Amino acid sequence: MKIKSIFETAKDTTKRISPIPAAERTLADKKHLSCTIRLDQGRTFQRVHGFGGALTESSGYVLSLIPAEKRQEAVAAYFSPEKGNRYTIGRTHMNSCDFSLGNWACVEQPDESLKSFCMERTDKYITPLVKEAQDCMGGNLKVMVSPWSPPAWMKDNGEMNNGGTLLKKYYPLWADYFVRFIDELKKRGINTWMVSVQNEPLAKMVWDSCQWTGVEEGEFAAHHLGPALEKYTGAADKIKLLIVDHNRDIIWDRFSESMAVSNADKYIDGVAIHWYSGDQYENLAKIAKAFPSKEIFFSEGCIEGGPRPGAWFPGERYGHNIINDLNNGLTGWIDWNIALDMQGGPNHVGNFCDAPILVDTAKGELHYQSSYYYIGHFSRFIKPQAQRIACTIDSYMTPATVDGKMGNMMECCAFKNSDGSLAIVVMNRTEADMRYELCEGGDTTTLYCPPRGIQTVIIG
């Protein structure tokens, strides 16, 4: 087996996506073998579009408070094709979200003509950040746009927060609003690749939110937004349209309900998911099997409840989720805020969260968290259009591990890049060294992964 390189990150070490000669992790002795990982290039699954993060008003604001060279460092840490996590996707919000400096909309007061449409708030912190990310990667950024709420005057509760619903008389106007926002971005040199109808449509939150039933979302997508986008771009340059954009526990029921609407299959390109309800990976697998032509996109996830500077578990949570989502049909992955301050904000309702890069705005310093490095083990090496290959694990009894159980020790996924190389991500969440066999074709190599560690193994 020709192992080209191994990259490693591990707790209580200095290794952070560090290259390691294969010989340093190769073992001749199979004693205390934890598992055998079998790769099968003959069994292939979905291709992936890539990885990315959210370019929110809060992230743009925080990065505006530090010296220009540090801001550039943060953007490059994510979007540089050479030295960063090689993100290719960015998600941003139309109107405000909770990670904004307050509630705002592009059309604040009732105006069914949309003549008062204003990009002032978007242009202050969001547009510059999106353009910096785009420039950093040579202009090839794929942008996803999502709303958290329509303007207050379009809703039945008269406010952007606390749920409420879009008044049905405004369905056509809200679709036009999407198109206007997309067109304004285009005038600024930003092309929209994908939209979702609504962020978390089941949620009644104290921040920007709007509730939709599955039927309502399907009808809006198939009868209003889809046709409006098609009219704007033409069929050849179709903007992808995703629905649900909510937790895994409800995605199967919601997606199935929306897809039963007439013309849904024509206009709805897939489902967006979040991780806040727990694992429930089987729901991705059900959608991948029942709707094989549709996208399954992870559009948001973070560590809730404020920042965790220096903590290791956030990285492991990311690794666990990314591996299992990919193994169940995921076609793209987007993190939440790329940068927040040391409080985990700003957030206009105090819903503070963690981010892979925390910014000390007073000192002008960037703090890279474990999540940044764990994400990088996927985003740097699983390249756009890579195809997942079969990766199975036979686990054995290993008394040295925390629980001594078979299984529950090693997790992995494997992809074949367009250049023919294989990228295998292996994660060990236990407190013990994990010795594992890696089998591909007729070749077998015995390696080990250190405690609380993650490795990317490149073959070929």
Image (tube, rainbow, N blue to C red):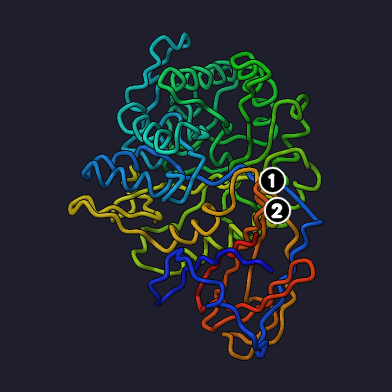
- 149 or 237, which is in the foreground? 237
Left or right for 265, reference 2: right
Asked which secondary structure carries label 2, the reply is strand
Query: Is residue 381 depicted above or below 61 in this figure?
Result: below
Label number found at residue 114: none
**Residue 107: where, in percent of width, then height?**
40, 19
Marked residue nearer the N-terminal end (2 or 1): 1
Q: Quadrant of residue 433?
A: bottom right
Tag 2 residue: 388
> Crowding near pointer 1: few (<14 within 10 Å), some, many (20+)?
many
Quadrant containing the C terminus in the rendered view: bottom right
- 413 or 442, which is in the foreground? 442
**Residue 329: where, in percent of width, then height?**
70, 50
Look at 42% across and 70% down and name the residue there: 15
Residue 146 visible to the viewer: no
- The answer to whether the residues at label 2 and label 1 have Cβ atoms under 8 Å apart is yes
- 416 or 213, which is in the foreground? 416
Look at 22% across and 45% down and name the residue there: 66
**What's under tag 1, amino acid-wise?**
Arg
- 18 or 190, which is in the foreground? 18
Quadrant containing the N terminus in the rendered view: bottom right
Query: Is residue 326 depicted above or below 116 in this figure?
Result: below
Query: Is residue 406 depicted above or below 271 in this figure?
Result: below
Label 2 and label 1: CA atoms lie apart by: 6 Å
**Residue 380: where, in percent of width, then height?**
51, 53
Residue 2 visible to the viewer: yes
Q: Quadrant of residue 239?
A: top right
Q: Quadrant of residue 373?
A: bottom left
**What's under tag 2, amino acid-wise?**
Arg
Query: Is residue 135 depicted above or below 337 in this figure?
Result: above
Asked which secondary structure carries label 1, the reply is strand
Tag 1 residue: 47
